[in-house]
Image (cartoon, rainbow, N blue to C red):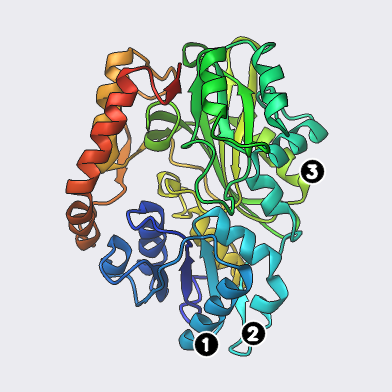
Amino acid sequence: MGPDRGVPGLIVKFGDYPLHHGGVGAIRSLGRLGVPMCAITEDRHTPAAASRYLTRAFPWPTTGTEEPARLVAGLLRIGRRIGRPTVLIPTDEEAAVLIAEHQEELAGADFGGFLFPRVAPALPRRLASKQGLHELCAEHGLASPDSVCPQSRNEVEKFAFTARFPVVAKNREAFQRRERPAVAGTTRINTREGLLELARDWGERPGVILQEYLPREQAEDWVVHAYFDENSAPLALFTGVKVRSWPPHAGMTANAYVVDNPELADLAARFVKEIGFTGIIDLDLRFDRRDGQYKLLDFNPRVGAQFRLFESEAGIDVVRAMHLHLTGRDVPEGEQRAGNRYVVENIDLPAYLAYRRSGYVTPHAPARATGTELAWLARDDMMPFFTMLARFVRPGARHLIQLWRTSRRGGTTTK
């Protein structure tokens, strides 16, 4: 039985990030099956809005820090304009958390309601929080980097005089209602002096988590993407290895391969079962060769940007699995297509140059790909690629140069 083409999908995103290949991938994935696809976009000239598989764009500029009531009201207005039950596909933590925390309003709307996996309302927010995730890992015996969550500047100073450097600083929450985050993504801090200097801008209540640094020479970066049903049983589960990211070793996936890893698949499935999660997940783990453990770095309770890396022999990815399941269809079983490669064109070239300079090689990457999925370029849907280029070239080039200069000093780092 094929998908229910009478039930549209809606890409839900909050914030200003128009060059998001995950949303384009979801539009193509279901659109190619004949499912009507809608999307929230920053404007009418984003790559997602340009896709031939998009039935309708809903331009809605947001920051992601709006009051939840305003975002819920906006979603309901869009739902009424679509006029029928619609599957929600969140592509960021803000959207995933909002949907989870307002399930009754969204599911019971007068147009038939939205369709989405029903989950414990507080769980996605906790999973998206670095502190919350670390606590859940400790509760359920899953390895994660040693972490400290300082509650005051004084605690940061005490940590600085006892810590073993380098350490990694991350924003404690996935999204914070403040003018600017404490750190710009994952930040490696090499010295006590560097930590104290950076902490000057954190105020009396630092919104950061400080973690042990897992040296890339002794580690491997793995990813898990999956969809779990209402019993937290996996209907689609995939494992792969990250070859390159941008910024180097600390950012978005730029190049990755599908690699069979039954041990990792079992570990992820057991953790999700224990915490009772339902829906799509995107996990980042680092295998620490020093102690032989997979350490969970990120648990994204939503569609990952690189989800199209993974497709089963039955043609199922996590977005297709979710749409089939929520519309009462069976999800066909099938093995993952091992050896398949995923490339994000606009960031993989600078990532390649940075990794080549560092000499880092991913141990488990196949010598040759069995197939390649490009994030932007597709023969049957060319306009998102050209729209991406038009929006990326000037500001994107300046941004890449800045990141490249940072990477030449050793990555996203503070002395």
Q: Earlier in the sequence, mark 1 or mark 3?
A: 1
Q: Position of residue 148 (x, y in %)?
A: 70, 26
Q: Earlier in the sequence, mark 3 or mark 2?
A: 2
Q: Name the image quarter holding residue 209.
A: top right
Front residue (pair 161, 250): 161
Q: Which residue shows up at 54% across the image and 34% down it?
A: 201
Q: Are marks 1 and 3 in contact (CB under 8 Å)?
A: no
Q: Is residue 237 visible?
A: no
Q: Are marks 1 and 2 in contact (CB under 8 Å)?
A: yes
**At numbered mark 2, what does the secondary structure look like: helix, strand or loop?**
loop
**Residue type (three-letter) at the residue carrying disc 3:** Glu
Horizontal side, residue 188 vs residue 269: left or right: left
Pointer 3 local density, CA inside 10 Å: few below 14, some 14–19, many at least 20: few
Q: Which dot marks residue 274? A: 3
3D distance between C-alphas at marks 1 and 2: 9 Å
**At numbered mark 1, what does the secondary structure look like: helix, strand or loop?**
helix
Outermost residue on the right side: it is: 139
Front residue (pair 330, 13): 13
Horizontal side, residue 285 vs residue 53: left or right: right
3D distance between C-alphas at marks 1 and 3: 37 Å
Horizontal side, residue 184 vs residue 272: left or right: left
Q: Are marks 3 and 2 in contact (CB under 8 Å)?
A: no
Q: Which dot marks residue 80? A: 1
Horizontal side, residue 246 vs residue 217: left or right: left
